[in-house]
Amino acid sequence: MPSEYAKSLGARLRSIRQQQGLSLQGVEEKSNGRWKAVVVGSYERGDRAVTVSRLAELADFYRVPVAELLPDSSGIRQEATNKIVLDLEKLYDQASEDLAYVGRYARAIQQQRGDYNGRVLSIRADDLRALAIVYDISPSGLIERLSEQGVLVADPRAFFGS
């Protein structure tokens, strides 16, 4: 009997396949037999364990990040739906080219909102997803990168003495 995690993983695999408009047989045909319909089906039902390397290969076949194949129980998708707050001073002072797109995006949001307090800026879930696409990573991966660079604000109230 499959574990709850195996069932959740299988449901996520099935969801991604169906989003791409593929049947199990379609996966086999599109992969030129690399992915057998019976094997993919057994992964989706949770009847067969999938190795990390096979999961990575399947993610590559579906052209999605591996994290997108993992079930929601990790909290990754839930975390990524929350807004984040950027420390604009640190962001704009960063010499790193790694955050250039985030800086440009933040300036565009400030301009659009007419929000020039110059200290912090909240990034909504949709903005976060758009930025993650630009960086070709998941929203949670972008949050991690921003955190590593020290430009995320844990408590925005601290900036305003509340």
Image: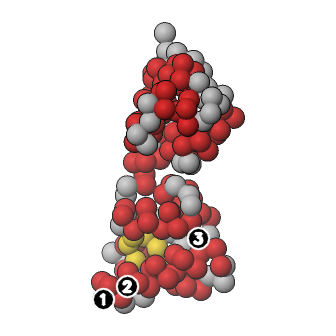
User: Does dot 1 land on a helix, a strand or a loop?
Assistant: loop
Which disc is residue 150 wearing?
3
Which of the colour schemes (rainbow, by chain, secondary structure, one colour) is used? secondary structure
Front residue of 160/121: it is: 121
Total label count? 3
Q: Find the distance from the CA under tag 3 to the CA under tag 1.
A: 25 Å
Q: Residues within 10 Å of mark 3 (few under 14, many from 20)?
A: some
* As drawn, 49 above or below 15: above
**Which three-letter amino acid code belongs to the residue tagged 2?**
Gln
The reply to whether residue 52 is visible in this rendering is no
First of labels 2, 3 by sequence position:
2
Disc 3, SS: loop
In the rendered structure, are the residues bearing label 2 and label 3 in contact, judged by CB atoms less than 8 Å apart? no
Name the residue that disc number 2 marks: 110
Judge left or right: residue 137 versus residue 82. right
The quadrant holding residue 30 is top right
Left or right, 108 with reference to 30? left
Q: Which x, y percent locates residue 12?
A: 45, 34
